[in-house]
Amino acid sequence: MKVLAVDDEPLALALLEDNIRQVPAFRLVASCSNAMEALAVLGKQEVDLIFLDIQMPGLTGLQFLQSLSVKPMVILITAYEKYALEGFNLDVIDYLVKPVPLERFLRACNKAQDFFKLKNNAFSAEQPDYFFVNAEYGLIKIVIADIVQIEGLKDYLKIHLADGKPLVIRMSMKGIEEKLPPNKFFRIHKSYIVAIAYITSIRKNSVFLGNQELPLSDHYKDDLLRVIGQGNRG
């Protein structure tokens, strides 16, 4: 899970970062000291879970949360219990009061992981096995099982299919990710998404699809190894 930490107190933020790094299923993608920095991160980076302080200068954590049209999962962290009801009315996963014992922190993390699994399972069950794209002056049906890899080309994508020539479409990487089942596809680099079923080997910072070698970014490597069952092994 991709995690964002937001707290205006440097010591509290450092402790939060350390706790997040102790959870194997989490990958800390960014830390912010205020809500405006967090908004900037969300504009560039997909985030699954936010650990969010409430009392911050400028835009408070609750105001920040209310401003989001698409909300990741949120765990609120604050020194004040009085905001708990308002927080839960905004459908947060949990509400932690500082100082947060590690055991209580991990319990909140487990709730987030359970919710994340339920959401993804529901997504996979409801999602059709195809989608349509604008290409070649018309609508082209793409069967998800036929996709081998997707290559980002600035404002365009090249969809490589198991049988047939690649299709070039105008769409963002984030847009295509929303159409793909997360348990079958994985982003290995800012410019590449691959079908896990077509991965034949992983060597250092490369992913191989048969004889084709693609770059594997350090940013995604640990999560990929965890997804294929090779993470955290000595």
Image (spheres, rainbow, N blue to C red):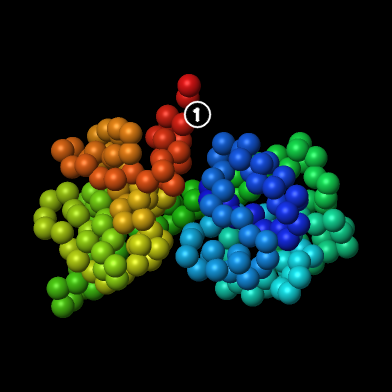
Left or right: where 49 falls relative to 86: left
Counting every numbered tag in the picture gives 1
Whole-percent x, y for residue 123 in the image: 46, 55
Whole-percent x, y for residue 25 in the image: 55, 40
Query: Which residue does the image show at 30% across and 32% down from the upper left?
Result: 203
Query: Which residue does the image show at 60% across and 44% down from the upper left?
Result: 113
In the image, residue 221 sits, relative to residue 191, either above or below, namely above
Q: In front here: 225 or 143?
A: 225
Question: Can residue 133 be seen from the camera position used here?
Answer: no
Query: Please, which residue is most extreme toward the left here?
Result: 164
In the image, residue 192 sits, relative to residue 67, either above or below, namely above
Question: Can residue 200 be seen from the camera position used here?
Answer: yes
Residue type at numbered disc 1: Asn
Task: Give the structural element (helix, strand or loop) at label 1.
Answer: loop
Whole-percent x, y for residue 68 in the image: 60, 72
In the image, residue 231 sits, relative to residue 124, either above or below, namely above
Q: Residues within 10 Å of mark 1 (few under 14, many from 20)?
A: few
Q: Quadrant of residue 8?
A: bottom right
In the image, residue 68 sits, relative to residue 49, either above or below, namely below
Query: Which residue does the numbered mark 1 point to in the structure image?
Result: 232
Query: Which residue does the image show at 73% across and 54% down from the upper left?
Result: 10
Left or right: where 150 falls relative to 175: left
Whole-percent x, y for residue 204 in the image: 33, 34
